[in-house]
Image (tube, coloured by chain):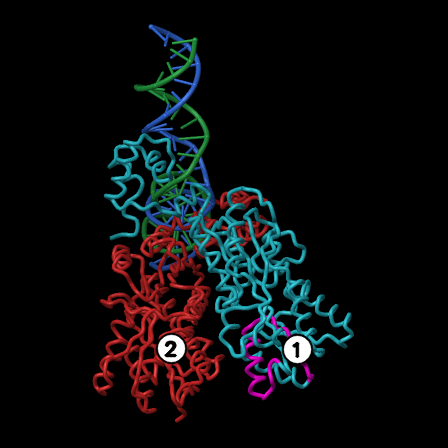
Chain colours: A red, B cyan, C blue, D green
Amino acid sequence: MHKQDVTIYDVAREAKVSMATVSRVVNGNNNVRKSTRDRVQSVIKRLHYQPNSVAQGLASKRTTTVGLIIPDMTNMFFAELAQGINDIATIYRYSIILSSVSNELMKEEDTVQSLLNKQVDGMIYMSDRLSPAVHEVFDRTSTPVVLASTLDADGDLPSVAIDYRKAMKQALDLLYQDGKRDLAFVISDYNATINVARRIPVFENFIKEHHLGVPRIYRDVLTYDQGEKVFAQLQQEHVDGVIVSSDLAAAGIINAAKAAGVKIPEDFEVIAAGSTKISELVRPKLTCVRSPLYDIGAVAMRMLTKLMGDEDLTHRKVKLPFNLVKQETTLNQ
Amino acid sequence: MHKQDVTIYDVAREAKVSMATVSRVVNGNNNVRKSTRDRVQSVIKRLHYQPNSVAQGLASKRTTTVGLIIPDMTNMFFAELAQGINDIATIYRYSIILSSVSNELMKEEDTVQSLLNKQVDGMIYMSDRLSPAVHEVFDRTSTPVVLASTLDADGDLPSVAIDYRKAMKQALDLLYQDGKRDLAFVISDYNATINVARRIPVFENFIKEHHLGVPRIYRDVLTYDQGEKVFAQLQQEHVDGVIVSSDLAAAGIINAAKAAGVKIPEDFEVIAAGSTKISELVRPKLTCVRSPLYDIGAVAMRMLTKLMGDEDLTHRKVKLPFNLVKQETTLNQ
DNA sequence: GCAATCCATGCAAGCGTTTTCATAGATCGT
DNA sequence: ACGATCTATGAAAACGCTTGCATGGATTGC
């Protein structure tokens, strides 16, 4: 059987109507007499007619497709976000074109442009850092964009996230209350907007206010191995409380600490600023800031459907509640 | 600025050539005089012309898009596969339409059909169980399909995987050599082809050959929680060696075992039949069958590009080497 | 130097839909 | 019962591109 064997034309001929009428039936336009509709539908079924989405897209200028720009699909954090996006997209019958920008094979702005060339109806962006080049592409297009679990520096794009300042503050307070005074912040990407514009200022300010010396920030720690490795430095600097942006890296840190015979949480506390399943399956279980990832994805996608349907947004900047989950890497209260 | 402000027409007019020539330049057809090509290209740059992929797709009947059918994107196992697929796809300039079929919002065969309607040039399928309804859709189309890390019962589709029989046998041998005699097999989906047609027969046969009684198979254990829960049953049955299909579930089992004071690996051994990062970050580290997931994805995608380019496949069934990684949940050799 | 060949380009017919506009017939109000 | 209003339908023009075919001028062979 061939790729497209039966077109709207064939259906029209068989049903003895014009293709316009078939098109109406296919699209649920109710300006069709019941008897006609039934006849057309039975022919559609008999011939196994399936509309060609590409042709539909060209004619209607809507592809019912959205682009997803994700930094790294093997990071569970994004996978959970994507799940929420996917479910809502399915409900609204949108397909998802996935663009992982983790590899260096293509520049991020080219990836986005290619999505635009595919005539996606909208995009969800969840990379950490919104480069000027990418932002420019977003500015140039009228295709709606929503940020999920990330922020843009100038804040003009619609977004769904948590209150990063508040989360950071609460995490720091917890460490401080537990008597920890030699604090450190371990992050993957220093220049990610959520770090440079949110968490880092809060961290530095906290250190200053409490007279805890110079703020210690360790960069480029994203993977498990990098986490394991950075522990030596933390120990050397006598750090006794650390906030780690990714829970995967945090897992590396606590495993290294255990291997070094350090007592957690008595002598060393760890809080992950982002969390996935991983925080539950390591021992001790990770105290962590839990973002409602699935919901962030779902809300972002829902916002996007509104934007794509020319509806207005009541809130362009949505903050969802997070949870500071106290587990075994901090003292019990 | 509007969605599509500049078309091939505008470029043609400005460059004083026909749209055919512009099309040739865009597509790298070298039947164009150098001077003409340069002129057209400079106009393209000046006007910021970007070809409309939908129109290209309709006219050329090629969309440079492939569909990915994935059971659950939050499962790291599939994420790593997808990464390999994505990288090769990027190299060959294919976009990926992601279809997660984990939710019950849409029947799997409808999802596949919708991919076909989008005129994807090919599909990679990595769900565990290939239902007859889906298989029928595959049979009906001429669009190529490759299976990644999964198998079809009748084996007529091209696929990339490991030798599941051999892997299962090696894992069982290891447990047996370590003196374990009360073995169990913990799986998520009994009816997945790789289980019902590969691992289970090997397991049952092994039990029989070694006179180890009745084969114990525990089904529907996929998540961490389910793993944690099933341990009680294992203990009750005095199981001392278990093979678990997913390492996430295995993590649940070992954590439950530790909590129950069971000594691993002395009194209880665990081998994960599938593995991801998770096997490295739990303690004790999981002994596991490591599939080259990234490579499986990459090879599958490469096969698909050949199929889409009407090339022949030298091997339709590729088996990649796996590794039985001996770690801390089995005795040291 | 003339027919044969090649090269660069243009013309125009699709690709399979949607959608605007026109219209014939049915329905309505009075 | 007659003009006015609806309703269901069809005709045909887009949508933006690719591609087979035709063609005129340049190049080649002998």
Quick check: B206 left or right of A91?
right
Q: Output the chain of dot 2.
A: A
Name the secondary structure under disc 1: strand
Name the secondary structure under disc 2: helix
In-front residue for pair A216/B30 = A216
Asked whether residue A66 is in view, the answer is no
Assess disc 1: are there few (<14), some (14-19) or many (≥20) residues with their C-alpha within 10 Å of its C-alpha: many
In-front residue for pair A277/A187 = A187
Q: Position of residue D30 (x, y in %)?
A: 43, 8
Quick check: A138 left or right of B300?
left
Residue at the image point whose x is 53% and y is 55% from the top: B124
Asked whether residue B260 is drawn in magenta, I would say yes
Quadrant (top left, top right, bottom left, bottom right) of the C terminus of chain A: bottom left
In-front residue for pair B207/B17 = B207
Residue type highlighted by circle 1: Gly
Magenta stretch: give its range: B237-265
Q: Where is residue B237 in the image (x, y as percent from the top left)?
A: 69, 83
Q: Position of residue B134 (x, y in %)?
A: 59, 57
Disc nearest the viewer among 2 and 1: 2
- In the image as oriented, which residue stretches furthest toward the bottom? A333
Residue A232 is labelled as 2
Assess disc 2: are there few (<14), some (14-19) or many (≥20) residues with their C-alpha within 10 Å of its C-alpha: some
